[in-house]
Image: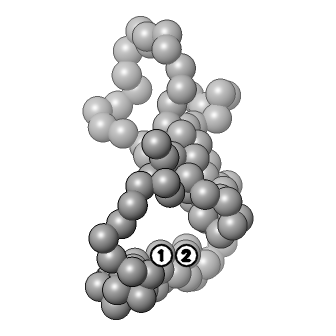
Amino acid sequence: MSSSEQPCPLSHTEMIDAWFLEHRAKVLDLAAFLDRLDRPTGPQSDDFRIEALRNAITLLIDGQGDRTRRIQMMLSDQSSEPIDAAPMQGALGAIPPADAP
């Protein structure tokens, strides 16, 4: 059963009343981050993480269901082969291009 098929004890309006302000703040935070990226002078980099974020936003507003799974899968490394060594400690949050060092 997908998340869209699971019954919810709250009405649509009750859900909006309970969580709208929290998610409004998240959208404003994302908008502020993107605005800050527009401010630096000089050439802008084509950072794969920002491209991935923009692609995720496209999925977010495409009107289709199952957004969480689709965005998570888009941002996740789907490879199953182990790598020799990690390039760094930590995660990037998006899949780097194949030609990245």
Image position of 58 (left or right of 101): right
Spot occupied by residue 22 in the image (x, y as percentages of width and height): 32, 82
**For this rendering, which residue is in front, 5 or 100?**
5
Would residue 46 be visible to someone looking at this image?
A: yes
Q: Which amino acid is tagged 2?
A: Leu
User: Mark 1 and mark 2 in contact (Cβ < 8 Å)?
Assistant: yes
**Marks 2 and 1: which is nearer the front?**
1
Which of 61 and 56 lies nearest the eye of the viewer?
61
Per the rendering, the mark at residue 30 is 1
Q: Left or right: where does residue 58 sit relative to residue 79?
A: right
Residue at the (67%, 28%) spot, across then down: 99
Disc 1 is placed on an element classified as helix
In this figure, what is the number of numbered marks? 2
Taking 3 as reference, is 37 left or right?
right
Mark 1 is surrounded, within 10 Å at the Cα level, by few (under 14), some (14 to 19) or many (20 or more) other residues, namely few
Residue at the spot x=48%, y=46% of the render?
Answer: 2
Q: Which residue is mark 2?
A: 34
Check the picture and name the quadrant holding the C terminus: top right
Nearest the viewer among 76 and 5 is 5
Q: Is residue 67 above or below residue 95?
A: below
Residue 15, percent across and down? Answer: 36, 81
* Mark 2, other Cα within 10 Å: few <14 / some 14–19 / many ≥20: some
